[in-house]
């Protein structure tokens, strides 16, 4: 599974990720245990290292550990 990047902020039902690649809108995001935790909702910033916001799934919001500073994958 390709690494998307690192979560730099987790607040409410969204994650802010500093990405290493440009994902597609709506693409599923996984944690390091292959569990889907959300999907890409917006992409902004420089093309070579963009920022990505992701909406968490309902299950991830309910059982949310701190995602801050964690690697996420696509």
Image: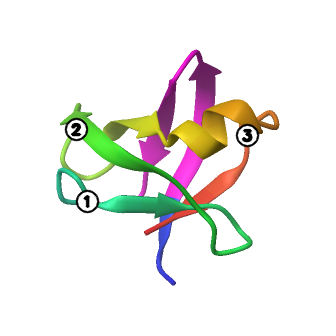
Quick check: can you spot residue 13?
yes
Q: Are marks 1 and 2 in contact (CB under 8 Å)?
A: yes
Q: Which residue is mark 2?
A: 43
Q: Is residue 47 above or below residue 62?
A: below
Q: Which residue is mark 1?
A: 23
Q: Is residue 34 magenta?
A: no
Q: Is residue 24 above or below residue 13?
A: below
Name the one closer to the observer, 52 or 33: 33
Q: Is residue 11 magenta?
A: yes
Q: Badge 3: how crowded within 10 Å, few (<14), some, or many (20+)?
A: some
Q: Quadrant of residue 60?
A: top right
Name the one closer to the observer, 20 or 64: 64
Q: Which residue is mark 3?
A: 69
Range of residues picked out in magenta: 5-23
Q: Are marks 2 and 3 in contact (CB under 8 Å)?
A: no
Q: CA distance from mark 2 to mark 3?
A: 19 Å
Q: Earlier in the sequence, mark 3 or mark 1?
A: 1
């Amino acid at each position: 599974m390709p690494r998307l990047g690192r979560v730099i902020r987790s607040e409410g039902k969204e994650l802010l990720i500093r990405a290493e690649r440009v994902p597609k809108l709506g693409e599923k995001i996984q944690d390091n245990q292959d569990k889907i935790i959300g999907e890409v909702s917006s992409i902004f910033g420089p093309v070579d290292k963009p920022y990505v916001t992701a909406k968490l799934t309902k299950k991830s919001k309910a059982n949310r550990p701190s995602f801050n500073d964690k690697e996420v994958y696509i």
